[in-house]
Image (cartoon, rainbow, N blue to C red):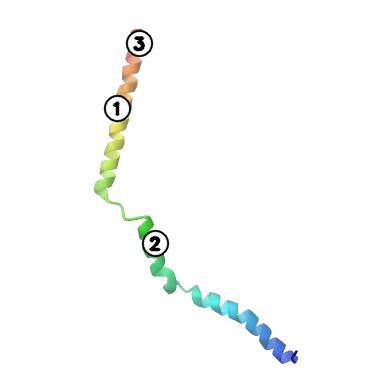
Amino acid sequence: MGTWTLEVARMALYISFPVAMFFYFNQPQYFEEWVVKTKRELYPPEDKEKRAKFENAIKAIKQKQELILLAQLENKGDS
């Protein structure tokens, strides 16, 4: 095949090429925009009006359940 210098050069290429590609492609500026865009799609900023409606709906459901429970407890006490 070749002399020892050729083998050393090939081994250096085999080792340095993946390391160089890893270093080059893992720079934040290459994928930061994509990550931010994807994160905003998956977790959009919270809308305070929708959040308030959601919390009010939960409170209304809990109040209905409490009224039903109280009515059931009153009926058991009468029997």
Q: Which residue is mark 1?
A: 64
Foreground disc of the pair 3, 2: 2
Residue 60 sits above or below residue 53 on the image = above
State the mark number for residue 77: 3
CA gap, disc 3 and disc 2: 57 Å
Mark positioned earlier in the residue sequence (1 or 2):
2
Q: Residue at x 41, y 69 (%)?
A: 32
Q: Residue 63 placed where, x, y %?
A: 29, 29
Q: Which residue is mark 2?
A: 38
Q: Is residue 64 left or right of residue 27?
A: left
As shown in the figure, which amino acid type bears the numbered disc 1?
A: Lys
Quadrant in which residue 68 is drawn? top left
State the mark number for residue 20: none
Secondary structure of the residue carrying tag 2 is helix
Residue 77 sits above or below residue 10 on the image = above
Residue 76 sits above or below residue 62 on the image = above
Q: Quadrant of the N terminus?
A: bottom right
Q: Is residue 59 left or right of residue 17?
A: left
Mark positioned earlier in the residue sequence (3 or 1):
1
Q: Quadrant of the C terminus?
A: top left
Q: Is residue 79 left or right of residue 47?
A: right
Quadrant in which residue 45 is drawn? bottom left
Decide: marks 3, 1 in contact (CB < 8 A)?
no
Q: Residue at x 31, y 32 (%)?
A: 61
Decide: marks 1, 2 in contact (CB < 8 A)?
no
